[in-house]
Image (cartoon, rainbow, N blue to C red):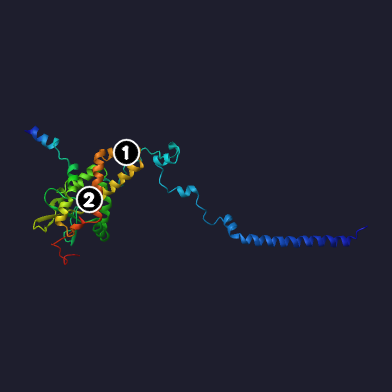
Amino acid sequence: MKLDSKYLKSLILEVIDEATRRDVLKGLAGLAGTAAVGGTLASLYNDDEEEPESLADKSKDAPPLTQKDVEEMGLKPEEYVTSNPDAWKEPKVPYATQQGKYALDQLRVTPQNLEYYSVAPASSNTGDGYVYVDMGMLFDMADQNPEIAESIDVSQAFFNDWTLKRHYKYVFGSLAFWGTFKDPEDPLSRKLAPTFPTTTNKGESIRNVILPLAWTVSLEYWMERFIGLEARLQQYPDNTKDILMEAELTESQYFEMKARYQDVISRVSDPAIVTNPNYNPEEEE
Amino acid sequence: MILFLTYLCCVVEPDYFQIANDNIDAYYDMCVKIADNPEDC
């Protein structure tokens, strides 16, 4: 049978049309399917959106592993523990000691016209009561006076070269010393701190010494340093002796200080109050 | 005499660590005397 060329051509075209029509239908079905999962697919190829956080990103802000962590996880210590041999040491405040001394001297003042004072978390054998301006009130003052705010911050550098034991003795060991302050206008002047009387319920008359702002700041920073000591003892158990030696503490002294720290922190967080009988609301600015 | 004074000044130095401990321990007795709210001492 001899095929007519015209018939053959129309047959070929018909086959091509049918194939094309089927392809179009397949293509439409494919597009519909793609649209159904389009969100997911698009998100896989969309470079503009933020890439999901990798494990490395998630762990970059995590604290470094301690020796204890590594041992508990069954890892090799030499590969995971921070290699800085001084990591256990107490960090220093980023100011010069002289700057710290100047800043602390600026705080050797005692606000006398407050209605209330907090009972200091320590007393002495002199028979005097000791009261102070607590950190909450001091921060209120700092909010109104940027110089006080800066002095609070910088004064910590005064203790940069001091061991924690020396700092502790300075705050609590000689409260009578804190009974004096320097007039900021005349650094060489020293005066007795102001006092006000209290009569106890047994009729006994007691003098309350108002500790200067510098004492409050020194107390606060001692507590901060002690918390830091505790944290480093936990983080670097292999350096326990080094850490205590840096603080100038024997093990028994550390436990004695820790017990006192717990007493002090409870007294500071929920203070007893003393009313100032000399308070004059008209003098208050 | 000078040696004795030197001894007093330098060797018999007060134990300020123990004094600090004692001062913190002395808080309660004084607090109940002077506080407006002794129950918080």
Q: Quadrant of residue A112?
A: bottom left
Q: Which mark is residue A104?
A: 2
User: Quadrant where the N terminus of chain B lies?
Assistant: top left
Residue A249 can be seen in this image? no
Residue A146 can be seen in this image? yes
The Cα–Cα distance between marks 2 and 1, rounded to whole angstroms, is 31 Å
The kind of secondary structure element at disc 1 is helix
Task: Answer few, some or many: residues within 10 Å of disc 1's Cα (few below 14, many 20 plus, some between 14 and 19).
Answer: some
Subunit that carries the residue with mark 2: A
Residue type beneath disc 2: Leu
Query: Is A246 placed left or right of A189 in the picture?
Result: right
Q: Position of residue A281 (x, y in %)?
A: 17, 66
Mark closest to the chain's N terminus, 2 or 1: 2
Q: Position of residue A178 (x, y in %)?
A: 16, 50
Residue type beneath disc 1: Thr
Give the residue number, with chain letter if any, for mark 1.
A240
Q: Position of residue A197 (x, y in %)?
A: 11, 58
Q: Position of residue B32 (x, y in %)?
A: 16, 55
Residue name at image x 17 percent, y 52 percent: B28
Label 2 in the same subunit as label 1: yes
User: Quadrant where the C terminus of chain B lies?
Assistant: bottom left
Query: Is B10 placed left or right of A250 in the picture?
Result: left
